[in-house]
Image (cartoon, rainbow, N blue to C red):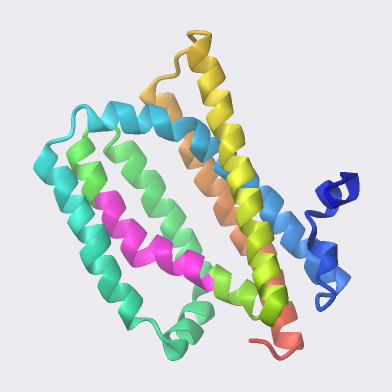
Amino acid sequence: MFNIKMLQDFGLDSIKELDSQIITLIKYNMLIEGVALVIFAFTSPVIVVTMISTVNPIWYQGSMLIEYGLGGVINVWINKTKLIYLKKYFMYLCVINCILTIMCNFLFAHLPNYRFIALSLINVLISSLVFRTIDDIINNLTTGSSLSILNGKKEGFEQIATLTGTVLIMLLTYFNFDISCDLALTLQCIAYIISCLNSLIITKKLIKHAKINNRW
């Protein structure tokens, strides 16, 4: 039943396979990532509308070609051995992903053609690998129906966070409070830093628990 207790523990206490320390870490991970998602949802419409109105169609189509073409190759390339390798260098990937994305936002803030291409490359070659590694680390902490429940809770919380950011930007738009694309990009950089720090601190502790419980 949906109640206050469920809001407080995100419904994770129903997963009996996880001990209290792991549940606490996952809740912190969801909460901090939720803050980043609120910022992304709040700023994305401003950035997309501004960028898409000035980007050359062929450059935008090229970025989609990279996302789907190269992304498909990368997804086929990933296997258990590759995941183990990625987890070994996970912290470095997080930092590199954060730095490159922030550089892309600042260097190409007024060059949408280059920004779309650069972000596509970063998303496929680094960001997607970081998120896949995080998911694998968390997934290894439980199995079966408990894993399905855990993924459902995470997805639901992410959707609520995204909805919150969307409602906030809609309210600002309704009351004619406009934010510039530069400010939106700066806020997104802050969100990337929050997400990176969360991965470095919380995910590192989850890795430790996974090793202790022989789920690495």
**Residue 172 image point, x, y percent:** 53, 16
In the displayed structure, 1 sits above or below 112; it is below
In the displayed structure, 147 sits above or below 43; it is below
Residue occupying the far front of the picture: 1
Q: At 87% from the left edge and 46% from the top edge, which residue is drawn?
A: 3
Quarter occupied by residue 38: top right
- In this rendering, position of residue 209 left or right of residue 181: right
The answer to which of 105 and 16 lies nearer the viewer is: 16
Report the magenta stretch's main SS: helix
The answer to which of 99 and 138 lies nearer the viewer is: 138
Q: At 55% from the left edge and 55% from the top edge, which residue is drawn?
A: 196
- Check the picture and name the quadrant holding the C terminus: bottom right
Quarter occupied by residue 20: bottom right
Residue occupying the far right of the picture: 5
**Residue 12 image point, x, y percent:** 79, 62
In the displayed structure, 101 sits above or below 22; it is above
Q: At 85% from the left edge and 75% from the top edge, which residue is drawn?
A: 16
Say if the magenta span includes residue 140.
Answer: no
Whether residue 100 is visible here, answered yes or no, is yes
Say if the magenta span includes residue 128.
Answer: yes
Residue occupying the far top of the picture: 176
For the magenta stretch, what is the residue range? 118-133
The answer to which of 39 and 5 lies nearer the viewer is: 5
Quarter occupied by residue 65: bottom left
